[in-house]
Image: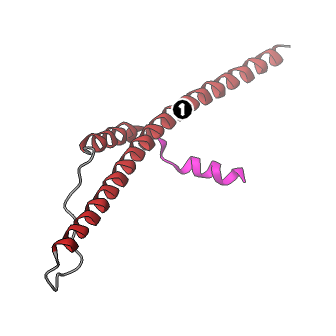
Amino acid sequence: MAIPWLAALKVIPWGDVIEHAPSVLKAARKLMDRQPPGQAGPPATTEPVSAVPSLGELKNALIAAQGQIERQAQTQRELTETLAELAEQNARLVSAVEVLRLRTRVLVWGGAAMLLWLAVLTWKT
């Protein structure tokens, strides 16, 4: 079961991921800053008006539309916050992977040096 994960990790272009992580984080923060709290765009009309509604019907429709706009604005704010959190997690993940890559290189070079040293000691005796 670990083989597919290792293959997937080898296929991922980590250099590109590391290179683009700061720009993704910056874009997510810009998106979050651009989103003012409590504001939403105009509602889209989906039904044509066939008859003149009464004032009470208009008032009820307006209240329902305002509620829907508020729910959509809240959903959009939550999605923007989630996107920013995911971008920050991605940046932390990329930095952790970079540390692990560095440690792996150090271990490989250290192991190779140890084997070379043992080979030299064995050859001399």
Q: Which of these two is toward me, 105 or 28?
A: 28
Residue 42 x, y percent position in the rendering? 19, 61
Q: Residue furthest left?
A: 52
Say above or below: 24 vs 74.
above
Badge 1 density bin: few <14, some 14–19, many ≥20, Cα 10 Å: few
Residue at 29% across, 65% down: 64
Q: Secondary structure at mark 1?
A: helix
Magenta segment boundaries in residue numbering = 1-15
**Quick check: is 4 in the magenta stretch?**
yes
- All told, the count of numbered labels is 1
Mark 1 highlights which residue?
Answer: 96
* Residue type for callout 1: Ala
Answer left or right for 3 relative to 48: right
* Residue drawn 16% across the image and 77% down it: 54
Please state the horizontal and vertical placement of residue 58, each as a whole percent of the image.
19, 71
Q: Residue at x 36, y 42 (%)?
A: 24
Q: Main secondary structure of the magenta part?
A: helix
Picture quarter with the N terminus: bottom right
Q: Is residue 122 left or right of residue 29?
A: right
